[in-house]
Amino acid sequence: MKTITSDELWAIYKTLPKKIQIAIFSEDTFNAVTNISRLYDIDEHSPISEGITHVLSGLLPPNMFIETIQEKLKIKPDTAKKIGMEIEHLIFNPIKKELDKLYKTESAPIEAQQEDPDSYRETLE
């Protein structure tokens, strides 16, 4: 993760959507990190918190979160993946729309992604 000053982070924070700002300082986020740290017997949960803050601030793409915490915490890949999945479920998914906009990776709903079934028939005929 890129080293960033608290002033730089605060300046970024001020530009974030309200839901992301709330998520960064929410009690739910704090509790999730604390509980996950206990569950996986991680004494040092600051790399997890820092990674979450960087994802929510637009500094660390969500797809790099697992790799980053694995490296910072020096944990096994499967443990990092489990932690990442829990963080995604508890913290990132509730604000997915805002994160998609932040990273400009907005995905269309599944219904919109499916092509017209008749277009396949035309190709085969």
Image (tube, grey):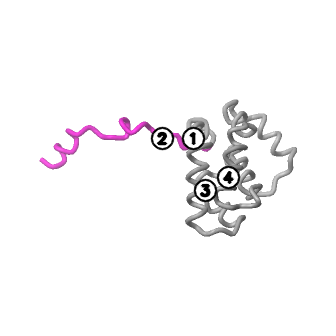
Badge 4 vs badge 3, beta-carbon distance below 8 Å: no
Of the numbered discs 3 and 1, the one sitting upstream in the chain is 3
- Where is mark 4, residue-wise? 60
Label 2: how many Cα within 10 Å (few below 14, some 14–19, many 20+): few
Residue 83 got which mark? 3
Q: Secondary structure at mark 1?
A: helix
Label 4: how many Cα within 10 Å (few below 14, some 14–19, many 20+): some
Q: Residue at x 21, y 45 (%)?
A: 120
Where residue 91 sits: x, y (%)?
62, 43
Which is more toward the observer, 108 or 72?
72
Amino acid type, residue under disc 2 in the picture: Ser
Amino acid type, residue under disc 4 in the picture: Leu
* Mark 1 to mark 2 CA distance (whole Å): 8 Å
Residue 100 got which mark? 1
- Where is mark 2, residue-wise? 107
The N terminus: image quadrant: bottom right
Q: Residue at x 64, y 60 (%)?
A: 40
